[in-house]
């Protein structure tokens, strides 16, 4: 067979394969693009963030001797210098906050207006769920304070716990961990919790209905989970911080009991198949999935049954569909990544982007962003969209309804919002 005939034969096979995939899903994807402006050559990628609705971006860039803050391509403010930390959009997408150096001091800028000056700003800058309040830790000399709406809240502390302050979903409660001498304790609503040797970083969590709060703490040589001030059983180690169910009635976390891996659900222990790294309740709260490390492998476990053993599971995350009937995860075997859903593995790609795996509201479609041959694209039910030059590291996809989704990509030197319509064949 001549070279040209071989090439023709390969092309036909590829076209038939693509037609088979499209026919099997019964859909095709139609994409539209809207530019958010050109990507500056001297952009500070550490500052790049996306609005909650996934239609705007904010970042800092160098311009001459100055640093500028931009939302999309619109300049918001110009500074002599800028903090190299991710910017934060408010939940409603109308406000932007970020740390900024002011000479030897630091401040937090809100919508281009700088707040009070401090010796340093903590890593957690948090908006309340209603977007009306902004809180963050700030350093005054060798002490730390919590700043709420540009006013210091309470007294000074020796340190503020990483991952706090945390707002409750209804925005009416705020909690943060503090160090006092050699002890750590949680402050919430003006009330001090019990003093512990340590509080587990990034473990403080409110229930979805805002009525409960939980966190991990060290008492002596053991670790335990505290829920609404009540201590759970002591263990050698907490391997996964507490997670509330969507209805706020259940609490799950993972621990080491001696050398055994244990999953604790509402205080009841059950053996885990490995060291648990991620826990998810189904939306109807009737099912539970977790990922776990076992030797050099990672496992997906659903309802107590192992669903797969892989070289890696992306972000250690498993996703339930809204109707709670389907479970998906992105997994790696060797050098290739694929998505497993309903126990079946999909097409292999060079990469699958973190935080992009999502189901449609009617649970019928599964979408994610993949990369192959240095190009990026949206995949819905195995059908690929048009290809783009790049995507955002912290990007994601949002379904507007069960037939339409969108995300942000890079195309020809610009950031673009990509709208994808799911059409029947």
Image (cartoon, rainbow, N blue to C red):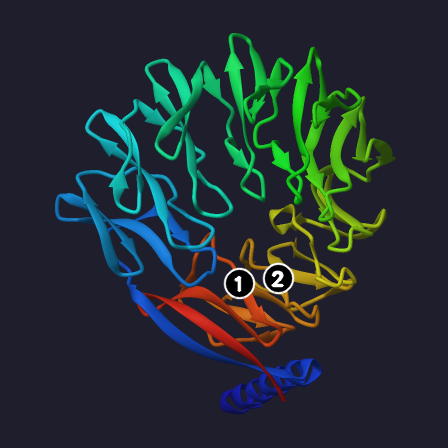
Percent x, y for residue 295?
73, 37
The answer to whether any part of residue 331 appears in the image is yes
Q: Secondary structure at mark 2?
A: strand
Question: From the viewer's perspective, is 135 left or right of 72?
Answer: right
Percent x, y for residue 396?
51, 59
Disc 1 crowd, CA 10 A, few/some/many (<14, 14-19, 20+)? many
Question: From the viewer's perspective, is 61 left or right of 365?
Answer: left
| First of labels 2, 1 by sequence position | 2
Location of mark 2 (residue): 358
Percent x, y for residue 123?
43, 32
The answer to whether any part of residue 388 appears in the image is no
The one of 326 and 147 positioned closer to us in this rendering? 147
Residue that protrudes farthest toward the top in the picture = 181
| Above/below status of 130 relative to 173 | below
Location of mark 1 (residue): 397
The one of 183 and 308 positioned closer to us in this rendering? 183
Q: Quadrant of residue 214?
A: top right
Percent x, y for residue 131?
45, 47
């Amino acid at each position: 067979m001549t070279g040209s005939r071989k090439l023709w034969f390969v092309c036909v096979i590829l076209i038939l394969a693509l037609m088979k995939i499209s026919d099997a899903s019964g859909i095709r994807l139609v994409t539209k693009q809207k530019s958010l402006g050109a990507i500056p050559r001297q952009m500070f990628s550490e500052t790049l963030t996306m609005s909650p609705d996934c239609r705007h971006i904010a970042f800092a860039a160098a311009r001459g001797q100055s640093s500028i803050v931009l939302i999309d391509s619109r300049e918001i403010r110009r500074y002599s210098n800028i903090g190299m930390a991710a910017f934060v959009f408010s939940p409603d997408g109308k406000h932007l906050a970020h740390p900024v150096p002011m000479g030897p001091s630091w401040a937090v800028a809100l919508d281009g207006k700088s707040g009070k000056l401090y010796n340093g700003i903590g890593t957690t800058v948090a908006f309340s769920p209603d977007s009306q309040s902004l809180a963050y830790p700030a350093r005054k000399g060798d002490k730390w304070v919590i700043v709420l709406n540009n006013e210091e809240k309470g007294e000074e502390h020796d340190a503020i716990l990483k991952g706090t302050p945390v707002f409750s979903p209804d925005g009416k409660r705020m909690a943060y961990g503090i160090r006092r001498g050699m002890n750590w304790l949680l402050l919430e609503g003006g009330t001090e919790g019990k003093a512990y040797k340590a509080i587990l970083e990034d473990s403080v969590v409110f229930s979805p209905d805002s009525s409960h709060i939980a966190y991990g703490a060290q008492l002596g040589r053991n670790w335990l989970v505290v829920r609404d001030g009540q201590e759970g059983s002591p263990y050698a180690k907490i391997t996964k911080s507490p997670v509330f169910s969507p209805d706020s009635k259940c609490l799950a976390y993972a621990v080491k009991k001696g050398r055994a891996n244990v999953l604790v659900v509402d205080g009841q222990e059950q053996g885990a198949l490995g060291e648990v790294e991620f826990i998810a309740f189904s939306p109807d709260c009737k099912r539970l999935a977790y990922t776990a490390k076992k030797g050099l492998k990672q496992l997906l476990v659903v309802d107590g049954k192992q669903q797969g053993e892989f070289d890696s599971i992306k972000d250690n995350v498993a996703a339930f569909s809204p109707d709670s009937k389907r479970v998906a995860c992105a997994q790696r075997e060797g050098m290739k990544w694929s998505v497993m859903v309903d126990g079946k593995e999909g097409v292999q790609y060079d990469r699958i982007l973190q935080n992009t795996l999502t189901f449609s509201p009617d649970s019928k479609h599964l979408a994610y962003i993949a990369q192959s041959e240095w190009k990026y694209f949206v995949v819905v039910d195995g059908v690929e969209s048009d290809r783009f030059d790049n995507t955002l590291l912290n990007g994601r996809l949002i379904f507007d309804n069960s037939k339409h989704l969108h995300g942000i990509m890079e195309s020809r030197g610009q950031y673009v919002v990509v709208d994808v319509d799911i059409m029947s064949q």
